[in-house]
Amino acid sequence: QVQLVESGGGLVQAGGSLRLSCAASGSIFSINVMAWYRQAPGKRRELVAVIASGGSTNYADSVKGRFTISRDNVKNTMYLQMGSLKPDDTAVYYCNAVLKTAATRPNFNYWGQGTQVTVSS
């Protein structure tokens, strides 16, 4: 079994910072791509940032320059450092990982349960 567990969400004032973590555990052989998504009330889930196993990153235009994604491949953990937060950043943030549970298995997509981030004006 594989679990992705997010932590670090909460309530913060506009202009503030938060750091999200996503820990992957269980029968993991290798993790390919990891990503953060978010979903605001009444809106579709959207990609926030993605990081490949080699460390290359990509960001949504709305968070470029404010958010930084990183990962620790030894700990199977991913982070999202969020700064200059805006009320529009309010959403449930989800961790996503594409990984293999064994060398002979194909990559599979896993999701965390989500963590709420609320930015007050």
Image (tube, rainbow, N blue to C red):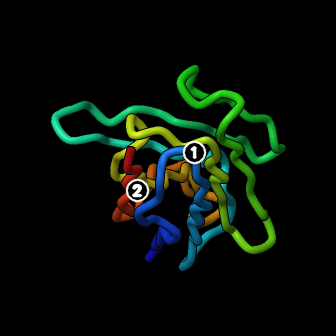
- The amino acid at mark 1 is Gly
Residue 65 position in % (x across, y down): 71, 30
Side (left or right) of 105 relative to 29 = left
Dot 2: element: strand
**Which residue is the extreme one toward the left?**
42
Dividing the picture into quarters, in which one does residue 31 lie? Answer: bottom right
- Quadrant housing residue 63: top right
Instruction: Say if 75 sits above or below 31 in the image.
Output: below
Q: What residue is disc 2 on?
A: 117
Give the quadrant of residue 51: top right
Name the residue nearer the viewer: 1 or 19. Answer: 19
Residue at screen point 47% across, 72% down? 5
- Residue 118: give x, y in percent of width and height: 37, 54
- For the residues carrying marks 1 and 2, which lies nearer the camera in this image? 1
**Left or right: where 92 falls relative to 51:** left
Tell me whether the residue at label 1 lies in contact with that at label 2, contact meaning CB atoms closer than 8 angstroms: no
Q: Earlier in the sequence, mark 1 or mark 2?
A: 1
Q: Mark 1 — residue?
A: 15
Residue at coordinates 57% horizontally, 62% vertically from top-left? 20
Q: Is residue 4 above or below residue 111?
A: below
| Residue in the foreground of this view, choosing between 43 and 106 | 43
Say left or right for 60 vs 69.
left
- In the rendered image, the quadrant that contains the N terminus is bottom left
- Of the 4 image quadrants, the one containing the C terminus is top left
